[in-house]
Image (cartoon, rainbow, N blue to C red):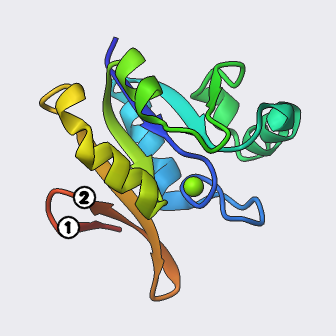
Amino acid sequence: MKTIAFDIDKTLLTLTGYPINNVLNMLIRYKKHGYNIILITARFPHFHNLTKRQLQSIGLDKYVDLDEIYYTSGGTKMKHLINNNVLAFFDDLQDNIIDIIKNQHLLPPEFKLYQVLYKDGDYKIYDTKKTFVYN
Ligand SMILES: [Mg+2]
């Protein structure tokens, strides 16, 4: 299955739990084009119920199976990208971006990595291969 993965905090949700709409719209667009969507978060697994409620409150349960969230608890996200044959991943954290770029030979050649960064009053999506911004 063609799978796209998203981080949660500061990627899909602000730290106060509001949706980051341009990333959310990207997720919805992928889903409508037939992609499977998974979430990979560094939250601890005992926050699953809270996480599920937060994501339901922004309507994500329509697009993602919220019982299939991958919790890394600070560990690497790479293994989940590899195991799920992920074709694109969205994350905000520079350390994750660096870890993935270092290990991208383990991922499919068409793999794309996007970084979500707060800049000039808004969250923007950067293609890490280009210096492209999606609004
Ligand atoms: Mg994050």
Which quadrant of the figure contains the N terminus? top left
Please rate how many residues cluster around mark 2, counting C-alpha atoms within 10 Å: few if below 14, some from 14 to 19, many from 20.
some
Q: Quadrant of residue 34?
A: top left
Give me the disc on residue 132.
1
Q: Position of residue 29 (x, y in %)?
A: 39, 39
Q: Is residue 25 left or right of residue 57?
A: left
Which quadrant of the figure contains the C terminus? bottom left
Question: Which residue is pictured at 49% across the width and 38% down the height?
Answer: 76
Please rate how many residues cluster around mark 1, counting C-alpha atoms within 10 Å: few if below 14, some from 14 to 19, many from 20.
few
The quadrant of the rendered image in which ligand 1 is seen is bottom right
> Closer to the N terminus: mark 1 or mark 2?
2
Q: Is residue 58 left or right of residue 31?
A: right
Question: Which residue is pictured at 48% across the width and 60% down the height?
Answer: 93
**Can I make out residue 84 in this image?**
no
For label 2, the residue is 127
Kindly state the secondary structure of the residue where label 1 is placed: loop
Q: Position of residue 66 (x, y in %)?
A: 69, 25
Q: Position of residue 101 (x, y in %)?
A: 25, 48
Query: Dots 1 and 2: beta carbons under 8 Å?
Result: yes
